[in-house]
Image (spheres, rainbow, N blue to C red):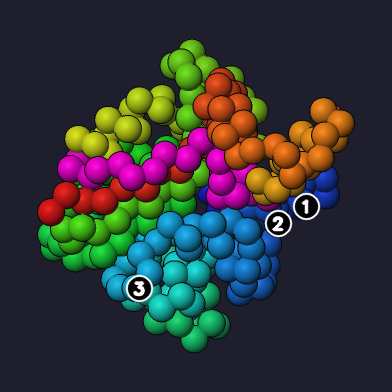
């Protein structure tokens, strides 16, 4: 197995994967990639889930820092948690991004299962594609809840879901980078829900694969409706959102994406 940095470098060298590289925001300059994320449909949909008044935010597993950048641009006081020191895909990249963007983003190199912060430190804990990487999902959610202030929000987006444990190898076999670095994973939907609820966080929204631009990115709900309408020879305007929601809820595709929004009990 190689490192995450080496896996991303390999992906960037594949001429037939350039669209995937851009969709994952692995391209450089990093500041341009972060701006594209900030101005894109995914972040627009995430922003709609966040509290109206920015406060202190912890960005779990921040990676290259694109969501830390977006939060800071929107006025949040951001701490980016990222254990990987890499200047390409980890803490080093976030520090460079913060400097280039002239944004105050604090970077902490640590794991989410053992957060180095006092209780009730943040109004928001945000994680983009983080929970499915947990070595201990319950502990990670419990730590997120611990550092949230009463009434604070957890927003965990684009988490890989499987319907049966037997589906995990199928998902991993189809992942573009898992064979290189071995760090991908997926949990049952029930495991995510139980871990979040047992941590003391009340779930407010559970968004299935078709219910939000967050999970569909780089596709959009509007684009999905248009493709479906063409197949059915119908105008997209008459396809209601609940149809997409029902379709997403019925999906058994290994690794499909869900997002979760919760609030810490007072």
Circle nearer the N terminus (2, 3): 2
**Viewer can see residue 171:** no
Total of numbered circles in the picture? 3
Quarter holding the C terminus? bottom left
Q: What residue sits 56% from the left and 53% below the top?
A: 5
Q: What residue sits 53% from the left and 65% below the top?
A: 66
**Front disc: 2 or 3:** 3
Q: Considering only vertical position in the picture, is 173 above or below 54? A: above
**Front disc: 3 or 1:** 3
Dot 3 corresponds to which residue? 54
- Between 259 and 80, the residue placed more toward the observer is 259
Which structural element holds mark 1? helix
Residue 250 magenta-highlighted? no
Mark number displayed over residue 22: 2
Q: What residue sits 43% from the left and 57% below the top?
A: 49
Residue 203 magenta-highlighted? yes
Quadrant in the picture for residue 43? bottom right
Left or right of residue 156, residue 22 in this image: right
Q: In the displayed image of the protein, which residue is found farthest to the top?
A: 166
Residue 141 percent coordinates (x, y): 26, 43
C-alpha separation, residue under disc 2 versus residue under disc 3 = 28 Å
Q: Considering only vertical position in the picture, is 229 above or below 143? A: above
**Viewer can see residue 40:** yes
Dot 1 corresponds to which residue? 18
Q: Considering only vertical position in the picture, is 111 above or below 248? A: below
Mark 1 nearby-residue class (10 Å; few <14, some 14–19, many ≥20)? some
Which structural element holds mark 2? helix
Which structural element holds mark 3? loop
Q: Are marks 1 and 2 in contact (CB under 8 Å)?
A: yes
């Amino acid at each position: 197995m190689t490192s995450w940095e080496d896996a991303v470098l390999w992906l960037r060298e594949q001429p037939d994967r350039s669209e995937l590289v851009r969709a994952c925001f692995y391209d450089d300059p990093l500041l341009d990639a972060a701006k594209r994320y900030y101005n894109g449909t995914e972040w627009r949909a995430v922003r709609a889930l966040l509290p109206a008044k920015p406060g202190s935010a912890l960005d779990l597993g921040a990676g290259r820092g694109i969501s830390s950048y977006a939060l800071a641009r929107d006025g949040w006081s951001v701490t980016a948690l990222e254990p990987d020191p890499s200047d390409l895909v980890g803490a080093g990249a976030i520090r460079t991004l913060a400097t280039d963007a002239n944004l105050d983003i604090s970077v902490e190199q640590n794991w989410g299962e053992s957060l180095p912060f006092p209780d009730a430190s943040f109004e928001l804990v945000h994680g983009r594609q983080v929970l499915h990487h947990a070595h201990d999902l319950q502990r990670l959610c419990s730590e997120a809840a611990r550092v949230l202030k009463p009434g604070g929000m957890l927003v965990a987006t684009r988490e890989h879901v499987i319907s049966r444990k037997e589906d995990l190898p199928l998902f991993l076999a189809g992942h573009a980078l898992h064979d290189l670095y071995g760090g991908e994973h997926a949990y049952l939907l029930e495991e995510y829900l139980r871990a979040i609820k047992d941590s003391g966080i009340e779930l407010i929204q559970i968004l299935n694969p078709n219910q939000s631009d967050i999970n569909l990115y780089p596709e959009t709900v509007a684009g999905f409706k248009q493709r479906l309408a063409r197949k059915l020879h119908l105008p997209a305007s008459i396809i209601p959102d609940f149809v997409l929601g029902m379709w997403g809820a019925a999906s058994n595709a290994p690794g499909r994406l869900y997002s979760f929004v919760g609030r810490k009990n007072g």
